[in-house]
Image (cartoon, rainbow, N blue to C red):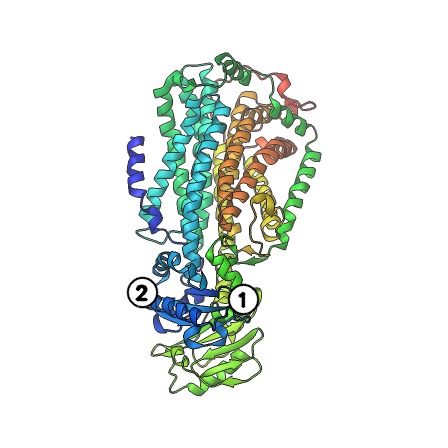
Amino acid sequence: MAAGLAAVCAWFGVSAHARLSPGGIVPTTTEAARADRALQRGFSATPPQLVLVARVTGARTVADPGAAAEAERLAQRLSADRSVSQVISYWRTGAPSLRAADGRSALVLVRLRGGEQETTRTAERLLPRLAGHHGPLDVAVTGEAASRAEALRTAREDQVRAELLALPLTALLLVVVFGSVVAALLPVAVGVLAVLGTTAVLRLLTSFTEVAVSAANVSSALGFALAVDYSLFLLARYREEKAATGTEEALRTTLRTAGRAVAFSAGTVILSLAALLVFPHTILRSVAYGGMAVTAFAAVGSLVVLPALLVVLGDRIDRFGIRPRRHRARRLAGHRAEALGRWGRTARAAMRRPGLVTVTLTAALLLLAAPFTRVQISLFDDRVAPASSTVAEAGALLREGYQLNAVIAPTTIVLPRFDLRRQAAALDAYARRVALQAGVDKVETATGTYTADGHKRPPDATASAFASSRGVWLSVATSGEPYSSANRDLARTLRELPAPAPVLVGGPGAVLNDVRQALFTRLPLCLFLAGAALFALTLALTRRPVMALTALLLNALSLAASFGALVFVFQEGHLAGLLGGFPVTGTTDALTPVLVFGIAFGLSMDYEILLLARICEEYRHTAPDGAAAIVRGLDRTARLFTWAALTLAVVMAALAASELILLKIIGVGLALAVVLDATVVRGLLAPAVLTLAGRATWWSPWPRRKSPAPPPAASPALAPAGLTGAEHPRSDR
């Protein structure tokens, strides 16, 4: 049945990537989005979706007859395309703003028909034809549609590259962990099933809503990581139990213990991602859809398909081993023996001086988190495109020789249903007021061009495009980067400025303001829902409130440290060389920390759930010696944490190899958060904090559950020196 389901999902999901979008960052209900729609529907002179930067090769200038003739042929080919609504070329208009200061390059502005998805598909089709050499012209292409098309292409290539890197490396690591090729392939099979199932779900969702391409990249990496995590814990527990009992009994015990923990763990990841659904941003909702689906598939594959495979394989699970059978038997026997492993001894050492360990490690994590206080929230622009892309090349040329915010990214003011014939004087007075605002260089509209010094030029031949039966609009040119705080402040000022009619303010500054407002308004709800849901799940698993609260606080601490590291690396540019290099803009994208939080919060709690489940299980056998339960539980699971974190880091490193900065940040952020959580936090800080909590750790307001008869009492060697059972009396009432 699983094989048939995988085949159906592969067949249905094969067309998913062709239906994914670049991912909208602007909620459709915001004023900036409504202004953009009003421009697209009502006017012909909207900001261009494609901007061609045509450089003249050799020592010639844009006045060269050969360059002019080639530019005209290029404009004619574009005008003949049915998806193109308007082409404005410097060589046709002679507008000084379309020519570089050195006279070596000029612009061709292209407006496309349709909405965001249609213009993106058109840009995908036109980019290969436009970018490159055209006679004496060397053309680079940018613009919103070009940036989206380039992001889609790069994301598809990155996903293939990431899967080709992650699959063999993950399988190799698992061979080392399990010592058998057959056993190592089982988590890979579960991961493939999870990814194929999620691809089919995303394909289905595209029939009802917009789905961002980032969801496919993130869910693919997350699917392999979770499949390995869950399968690793189940297989390790199965082998541990099988060494003492038969196959059937070993499977029952595995699913009753580790399987229950995996089910709760999957629930924490799903609920953490579900908290992202409170945001109206398409990219956040898409990643939530994909992440929730892949987590559910990974859990079902691990809890249903994996046990079936274990029954089918039987003893053949150890075939093609890389260690002798006797060595594997000794490892299993040693694992069930009373002697502590390395992680158990580490936990015992941390529990001898819990106060010192807690204070030292908390201070270290807070130090890592400190750079997050310097975060500068903005949005990604063309500067984060791959350096080799035509979009990055054109963007660099525009910044060097043109007024960027006047040519392709002006602030726009739309006055719907404004009657120009009756209220021309009112529009003139309003345009003058706009031109006098701080940060404004000039204003263009149907009544003329206005400059910041109070001068006005009469309307030219293009002025009629600023008015239609649907109203009028103004183009406001500013200085600096499009998504700057100055442009954001200007957008807020313009919305409050008295106007002769209701206005809609759009453009980069308005987009940044609206995205931030929609994000920060709903962020407290997201944090509350994620925290409350995960606390409730952890409480349901452990039945101990203090233990559940401790887990939540430690998780928040490790995430804060990861966020600080992301600001230190990606915003400020430290260690860029170690990560293959990336553009440093001095800002952090507004949506990235929320994305990393939604995924990493659940993944970190994933380890916490598995650890606490084993500690509580050991406590039922060692009570009232809570210290021994902590040491034994950590000793039984920490080795798996280490391998699981290493495997996830490999998968996320493949994602971090992406040329898209968003995917690179997510990959690095998740790898760092999980590795830090699985080693420092769970291996040292958690046992120290639980020891400090003392009796409160084991307090439960519910009656004790009946449990099977306990095994023989634990060896005294398991208790940390200086801690006895009497110091941790059981308190189940």
**What amino acid type should be assigned to the residue bearing mark 2?**
Asp
Q: Which residue is mark 2?
A: 81
Contact flag, marks 2 and 1 (Cβ < 8 Å)? no
Can you say whether 431 is above or below 562 in the image? below
Image quadrant containing the N terminus: top left
Can you say whether 614 is above or below 82 in the image? above
Is label 1 in a helix, a strand or a loop?
helix
Q: Earlier in the sequence, mark 2 or mark 1?
A: 2
**What amino acid type should be assigned to the residue bearing mark 1?**
Arg
Residue at 57% over, 48% down: 581
Q: Nearer the viewer, residue 720 or 22?
A: 22
Residue 381 appearing in the image? no
Residue 476: x and y, percent? 49, 74
Is label 2 in a helix, a strand or a loop?
loop
Q: Which residue is mark 1?
A: 488
Residue at 55% over, 75% down: 440
Q: How many marks?
A: 2
Image quadrant containing the C terminus: top right
